[in-house]
Image: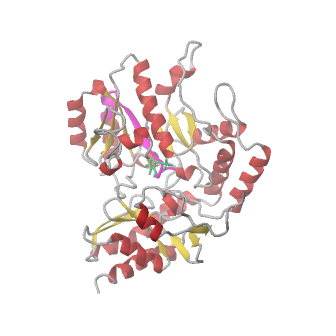
Amino acid sequence: MTSPTQPTGASLWHAQAHMPTAVRKRVTIVEGRGATVITEDGAELLDAPAGLWHANVGHGREAIARVAYEQMLKLETYHVFGRFVNDVALSLADRVTALGPVPDAKVFWSSGGSDSVDLACKLARRHWQLEGRPDKRIILSRNNAYHGLHGFGTSIAGLEYNREGYGSDSLIPETARIPTNDLAAAEAMIAELGPGRIAAVVAEPVIGTGGVIAPAPGYLEGLQRLARQHDILFIADEVITGFGRTGAMFACERFGLEPDMMLMAKGLTSGYAPLGGVLVGRRVWDRFFSSDDAPMLRHGITYSGHATACAVAHANLDILEQEHLLERSAELEGVLHNAIQPLADHPLVAEVRSGTGFLAGVQLRADVLGEAVVDACLDAGLLTRLIHNNTLHICPPFVVTDDEVSFIAKTIRVALDTFTA
Ligand code: PLP
């Protein structure tokens, strides 16, 4: 059946939405070109959040579409359960493990960020069980953290509202949160819970959905040190920061981190197909690979290592390399920082957070109606959205021009001015 040309849309339940408002103010995107998207009414909007932090190489890439087409004609996919695999999942595994910050890594493919989070948390618990330390089950995460919305991701969320209503405290028991950027408090929490009960600590190198919060100087390195000291696995959630968002291939490189596991999704394919993965260090994978009586990891989903998604990831990585987009992202970090920081003086702005990676958050004062500001930006040709704490989400595709970055800052200022006049 072909879809109707004029969908009523009455049947769709949007994600993370207050549905009556979402239906009333729906923005339907029908096309994308570079850093711009086009609505069903023909309005051209600069896509400041790159979709959901994913469209790193920009929209409308013909080269990626062709690769997907060719791969689907040859083999849409084949699963990777048991002894069966597809050739593209294999070749992408070699390529991505060679790029990653985890030495001598294996990769377990997933179909997105939340899948990667759940796998890493399961694997951390399974690791300690097989080490003969089954009491090590607690997963630590940070206040303000967002790790997707599957079981573990919901439970370790540092945004309280994402856990509400799914259980007394969390969906999956034995999770705890540490303050966002306070190493001494993290150390105290580890001592209080007991390192003998903690399996892993999970951290986004730069917190995204929680409001764009950079790590305090030395914080991530210190957190990794604490984890090592107490025999706790260190997991870096690079679902947003991976594949160039902080100017390096991975933020772990930028901060000198060598995690036991690293999570990826979004920028792996720039959103052209759903794909995620977990890079796993030798400490964790060794026992699963090394002997005839090796245990099995009872995990997998039908589309782990989906062949077309993996082919798309190859094409996306080719573009990152050929167009030197990591270097461009590093350059754009400064361009955005310089353009956006002056907004901090605006009376309706509480704080502007930028300068660590090519992403920024403009936090509006709590009493400012953020959705009205988003509306004014949309009317002026800028797509932005609200994330935690009334914060405007800015993390454009790496193909924006310097002028387009200036346009983002100018448009937000003009939009804010209409509410102060
Ligand atoms: N981890 C982080 C840091 C994220 O930002 C997200 C999504 O925004 C996820 C995990 C979940 O990814 P997905 O929505 O692909 O499941």
Choose between 261 and 217: the one closer to the eye: 261
Given the current orientation, which residue lies at the most extreme bottom position? 421
Q: Position of residue 118 (x, y in %)?
A: 46, 37
Horizontal side of 312 relative to 288 (left or right) equals right
> Which quadrant of the figure contains the C terminus?
bottom left
Q: Residue sitting at 30 percent across and 52 percent down?
A: 216
In this rendering, is residue 229 above or below 268? above
Choose between 154 and 84: the one closer to the eye: 154
Q: Residue sitting at 74 percent across and 56 percent down?
A: 66
Q: Where is residue 397 in the image (x, y as percent from the top left)?
A: 53, 63
Residue 34 appears in the rendering? no
Q: Which colour scheme is used?
A: secondary structure
Q: Where is residue 160 in the image (x, y as percent from the top left)?
A: 30, 49
Residue 90 appears in the rendering? yes
Residue 401's image quarter? bottom right
Given the current orientation, which residue lies at the most extreme top position? 293
Choose between 332 and 168: the one closer to the eye: 168
Residue 153: say if magenta: no
Residue 377's image quarter? bottom left
Residue range highlighted in magenta: 226-242
> Which quadrant of the figure contains the N terminus?
bottom right
Horizontal side of 163 relative to 151 (left or right) equals left
In this rendering, is residue 139 above or below 9? above
Given the current orientation, which residue lies at the most extreme right position? 74
Q: Where is residue 316 in the image (x, y as percent from the top left)?
A: 63, 53
Q: Residue sitting at 28 percent across and 27 percent down?
A: 195
Horizontal side of 418 relative to 121 (left or right) equals left
The number of discs equals: 0
Residue 229: say if magenta: yes
Horizontal side of 33 relative to 103 (left or right) equals right
